[in-house]
Image: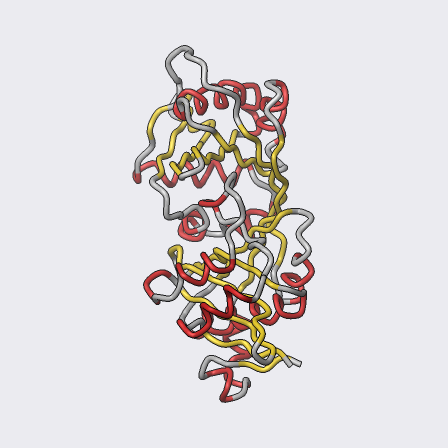
Amino acid sequence: MTLVLPLSPLHIPQLLLGHLPPSQAYPWERLGAPPASAMSIGLAHLWPLRGRAWVAMRGPRVMGVVACTHRSHHTWEVLGLCAQEEGAAAALLQEAARHLALAGGERLLLRLPAEAPLLAAAHRAGFLVVAYEHLYKGQAWKDSAPSTLLALGEEHQQQAFRLFLSASPDAVRALQGPTLGQWRSALTSQCPSRELGLWEEGELLAWARLSLAPQGVVATALVHPRAGARAPEVVAALTVFAGPRPLYMLVPSHQQSIIAALESLQWPLVGRFISLVRPLAQAAVAAPAASLETIRGRVAVN
């Protein structure tokens, strides 16, 4: 029987000796970086201000750990997920969903590699696929003409959201950003970020977001369907803004014009990911029927 418990300092030695595999969760901050270790996840989330974390125990043996952080607009994201087996991972995700729902959360986000062994566990825990994503690594920086992308501020968020609605399939709009607030919450990260836009006659034709992370610059972009020919211009501008640092570009699979521009430049594809979301309303409804041990922070899983 597997027991899921809130992470405490007593679990750190067990994480050290548990020989758990590296995390399979890749939040925005870790794109392009090596996977996080179970120990680093545990140490980073011992204090509640860093987020919330749980461990799966089977007797004295640790079977897994999951850590989540609050983004914004009642949205949480899985920052780390290490587990020895699918059952332990599913139990951890289900327990995280229950507790975050009780705390007022509405969504729990998770990004996994496309071939992640724990993908089945995420489906068992109620996660839905939002989008398939490609991660490219930019080539060495070369000096070029001044960028045509301009900095965007808070006053431009509505135009950027309209572009997202125009450039995304129905399923992506429904799960990732049915409202402006929820779309913005899915973009929130712990890294310093800036947003850029390509304008034409007062209309926003392309939007991009760049974040400075320890491994380099992490970026994503959207191009309006009728402005696909401007995708190479957007990519060139992002390369200029990244400067000499490595540039990791995360592109949704439906943004074919950007993918074509990157592949024409022979940027290497370094990862394929699946973005998932777990609506938490159902978990909140189920929580009152859970056992007293669950409400106290523990749940036994057969």
Vertical placement of 52 versus 264: above or below? below
- x, y percentage for residue 259? 61, 28
Left or right: where 262 falls relative to 198: right
Residue drawn at (51%, 73%), measured in percent from left and top?
98
Vertical placement of 228 versus 113: above or below? above
Residue drawn at (41%, 26%), measured in percent from left and top?
242
**Of 79 and 17, which appears nearest the observer?**
17
Vertical placement of 35 versus 50: above or below? above
Q: Quadrant of the N terminus?
A: bottom right
- x, y percentage for residue 179? 45, 51
Left or right: where 49 falls relative to 74: left
Q: How many marks?
A: 0
The image quadrant that residue 145 belongs to is top left
Vertical placement of 15 versus 240: above or below? below
The image quadrant that residue 286 belongs to is bottom right
**Of 42 and 18, which appears nearest the observer?**
18
Residue drawn at (62%, 69%), measured in percent from left and top?
88
